């Protein structure tokens, strides 16, 4: 699949996982719903809700799941909202 930055939505359905490689510097913007993100090299996981964005700071693998479903837009480096990592249950 070829993706163009900043154009259209990528729907992420319940149970679906989107994998991004070498995404450092990209901003991930949640257009609607909610998305769960795990980013290799960044501590904790992140939950983005509609209207929130997160910049990928590491070069590791990014896993994006619908929570339960959402829509995502990939943007070049830009101003983003800061998201607090979720505490991991142990």
Image: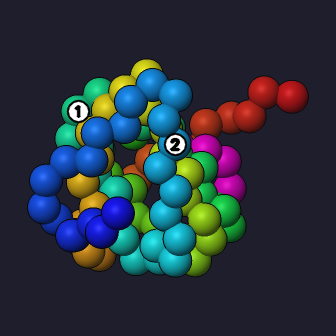
Residue 13, relative to residue 78: is it above or below?
above
Dominant SS of magenta comes to strand
Residue 64: say if magenta.
no
**Residue 18 position within the rendered picture, expressed as x and y whole percent measured from the top left:** 47, 50
Label 2 neighbour load within 10 Å: few <14, some 14-19, many 20+: some
Residue under pointer 2: 17
Q: Residue at x 29, y 39 (%)?
A: 11
Applied colour scheme: rainbow
Magenta residues span 43-47
Foreground residue among 40 and 65: 65
Q: Residue at x 52, y 77 (%)?
A: 22
Residue 67, relative to residue 11: is it above or below?
above
**Residue 35 position within the rendered picture, expressed as x and y whole percent measured from the top left:** 42, 36
Dot 1 falls on a residue whose secondary structure is strand
Does any portion of residue 33 appear in the rendered image? yes
> Pointers 2 and 1 in contact (CB under 8 A)?
no
Residue under pointer 1: 32
Residue found at the very far left of the displayed protein: 7
Quarter of the N terminus within the rendering: bottom left
Residue 2, relative to residue 84: is it above or below?
below
């Amino acid at each position: 699949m070829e993706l163009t930055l900043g154009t259209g939505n990528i729907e992420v359905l319940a149970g679906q996982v989107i994998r991004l490689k070498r995404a450092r510097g990209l901003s991930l913007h949640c257009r609607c719903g909610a998305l769960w993100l795990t980013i290799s090299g960044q501590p904790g996981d992140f939950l983005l809700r509609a209207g929130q964005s997160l910049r990928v700071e590491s070069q590791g693998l990014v896993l994006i799941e619908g929570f339960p479903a959402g829509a995502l837009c990939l943007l070049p480096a830009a101003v983003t909202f800061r998201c607090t990592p979720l505490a991991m249950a142990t």
